[in-house]
Image (cartoon, coloured by chain):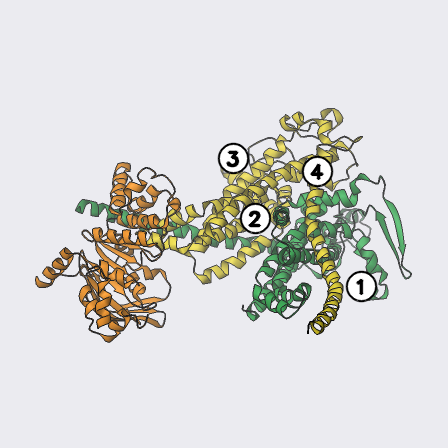
Amino acid sequence: MALVKAFTQFVDPPTEGGAVDMAQQAESAPRRPKLETIQMNFFYGIHQALREISLKVHEKSVTALIGPSGCGKSTYLRTLNRMNDIIEGTRVTGKVMLDGEDIYARDVDVVSLRKRIGMVFQKSTPFPKSIFDNVAFGPRISGITNKAQLSEIVEQSLQRAAIWNEVKDRLRDSAMALSGGQQQRLCIARALATSPEVLLMDEPASALDPASTSRIEDLIFELKQNYTIVIVTHNMQQAARVSEITAFFCMGRLVEVGQTKQLFTNPIQKETEDYITGRFG
Amino acid sequence: MSNACSSRPDEQKSSLRHLMTLQWVREQLIQGLLFTCALLSIITSLSIIYILFTTAVLAWPPGKSFFQQVGLVEFFTETRWTPQYAAEQRHYGILPLVCGTFLVTGISGLIGLPAGLMIAIYLSEYASPRARSICKPILELLAGVPTVVYGYFALKFLTPYFIMPFFHGFLGLPVNGFNALSGGIVVGIMIIPMVASLSEDVLRAVPSSLRESGYALGATKFDVSTKIVVPAALSGVLASFLLALSRSIGETMAVSIAAGQQPVLTINPLSQIQTMTSFIVNVMQGDVVAGSTLEKSLYAVALVLFAITLGMNLISQMILERYREVYQ
Amino acid sequence: MSLHRGGYEIRLVWRHRLGWAFEWICRLTTWSTMLLLFVLLGAILVTACTPDQPLRNPNFKSTVAAGNGIPAEAEFLPAKKPRGWLTWDFLTKGNSYIAEDAGIMSGLWGSIWVVGLTALMSVPLGVGAALYLEEYAKPTRFTKLIQLNISNLAGVPSIVYGILGFTIFVRMFGLRDRPEKFICSLGFVDVHFELPLGRVVLSGAATLTLLSLPVVIISAQEALRAIPASLRHASLALGATKWQTIRHQVLPASLPGILTGVILSLSRALGETAPLVVLGAAAQLSIVPGRITSLGDAIQHPGKLLQAPFDQFTAIPLQVYSWVNDPSRGFEYVAASGICVLLVVLVLMNGTAIFIRQRFQKKIRW
């Protein structure tokens, strides 16, 4: 326990405001969570990757998913916007709810679902098009063709992703010419352009240098005022810095979930404590 | 100690060196032999260029090359190609042949390129592995059918049962038994497998992370295929188009059989035409007097053909190499 | 906001419809192209198997006019090909200007000789070049030039190779005005040949070799590249020389891939007509190279085997081409039969290639 305490010395606590908000939310009547999975199981063919995951994600908050490699946190993230549908032979049982509606129901349109839930990947994947076209891609395929409208959306998204000032003069240049950190922020802007309600981030800063990483983390702080964010990270310090709720996954099971500060200082499960103190993973 | 050490290594050294000599010579011989095999390709290229150049452009004196006899201006601007007529009526303008070639190639491009690309998109984005395992061997078979077979099919089936009834019977247009349209259609069918397999390779080379990003933004499969994958692979697709068109330009037998032997400067696909390749084949079927202008004209036409296809192949390869650098 | 929502949903429905339509267009294009192959082959097969129409007897009128008790001949002669044109006769007869008597034997044997010799020449040269480029060559600019050159040669139209072969073998660069005859006496046989070689099997084979070389080299290179470097390193570490490594490890392992490529390039050579026409090979020929009449003949007179490469020849696609161009009645059926024979041989060759690829691909898993 002393180790855990020492460890938390290195951790920047989330803003006071955030903590207060969370406390207030916990006190007031429990509102319907933005995203919720109820007893969700996930199968790759016959191999079961996720077991009985029941997790609530609250609106306009940051939820971090941590755990050792291969524990299923990325798989879980991808079930939230049905990205795993692309892979053959996958199967989901249980319920995954967005605003109280099951997203795996028969008549759900996956395309409009993914417009409401955006995703940022580990490795930045800008399209080989101009910066403008990258960000405008989402709105364009939704049917927005008005040039003025598109320009406005692009500018707004780039500003929200804190990259506008760096690229505003070269919107027509190729996105491939940007640096790694810039490309990742561009991908965030691209995801924001479809006006999603939820933003899923799969280790967004793991491929970046420390300076870019901290910029992304600052960005997440700003974004959580308007978006619900779920972030997968293998960096525990990062989880402790940015999130209000942290969920610890291990071997396909949800071991423990709770308020970040509490999970890192006083974990309930022994597995959680072992992982946090670095005994495995 | 030092004496004992120095005497042993000397003996060993000399025996090693002896083995190396014999084996070394053998290895060098083999390497030289293999190098000669590789050199043969350069010799082939140089021979082709030499032969075409010295007969058509600049001959060893005292002989005269084709252009020295006929002149570049007439060759490129004259609109009649009649090298086999009597001396006063002989004209050596290559325009009818070039026009015929491009007419057939154009028609084949209109058919083969879009069809091949759509097949490539289907195979790389939509088809199940089972469908792909059926389609790919059949495409290979199509590619392996000899060109005379296509020519026969065009002449004996396509023209009488499809082109004639439609254009002549239904639309009332005059259709020649030999026409550029039937030649163009079968050459188009011939290049479909080539376009499909080359384009499919470039489409599959686009990383799946790009597709995933597209899906995550709320794109349908159609959006991803046409607005992300194909634009990303565009240069590779264009390169495959160029290669296919170059093949179509060099196509000989099918066009000779189906499109006719009459050099006519026209863009009417229903008339008979002669392409550069069918001219050469037509003349060589008879006997050619050695050293005659007719024979030299063959080389001149072959030179133009070679230059066009070489240019297209080189450009396409440059594009493909740059494309591979980006994605690999 | 709700209005916008409605617009999005309507557009979404149309987007889905568009995607569905596009998928079906692509699917239909693919399947109709597949179907085209069967239509093509089916049409030709049906033509080849069409029973012959009974012919009018040319002697009919004269018999009737005589009217002197000589038994009248039938007005219609029995059809010579009652069961279609693709018969055993067709395979064993030489060419003829009468459609019903035309056969493909000379073309068949000519093709076998030419493609056989092409194989003998192109395999060592092609595999040798590929070995040099993959195993020995250093990545200098010269090597890149050779590589680029081979890729370009693969795209040169086949008719240009025909011109090349014509210039070398028939005209010999214009060095000789008239062909001179030579006799090479080998004791048991006298081999007759000319210089320049002229329109003989050897010239045809050499031209087709030059044509197939780029394809053989490229596919052999790919087969060699598929062998992992660890195999070569292991052999070298045991003290083997480079050539020993190649001969005992690399070549046997890459053999299936090389064989597949060779067979595919040979089947392409089998179907090539243009270079042979330009070379001037005869299309109307009734003899077989070497004038070998049967297997027994070949065994009794082995000299004929040596003479064969220097004889005139014809090939299946050449005969088909001349039949297709012949406007006389009946030759379109003969051409169809010739195509059937050609396709059967090709299917056999390609089938062997696919079989080898399937069988040996499974054995070796790197």
| N-term-proximal mark, 2 vs 4 | 4
Judging from the image, mark 1 belongs to the subunit labelled C
**To which residue does mark 2 refer?**
B190
| N-term-proximal mark, 4 vs 3 | 4
**To which residue does mark 4 refer?**
B52
**To which residue does mark 3 refer?**
B172
Task: Please tell me which residue lies in front, C131 or B294.
Answer: C131
Q: Tell me how far mark 1 sits from mark 4, CA to CA.
A: 43 Å
Q: In the figure, the green chain has which letter?
A: C
Q: In the figure, the orange chain has which letter?
A: A
Q: Are marks 1 and 2 on the same chain?
A: no
Q: Tell me how far mark 1 sits from mark 3, CA to CA.
A: 56 Å
| N-term-proximal mark, 3 vs 2 | 3
Q: Are marks 1 and 3 on the same chain?
A: no
Number of other residues with Cα within 10 Å of mark 1, as a class: few under 14, some 14 to 19, many 20 or more: few
Judging from the image, mark 3 belongs to the subunit labelled B
4 vs 3, front mark: 4
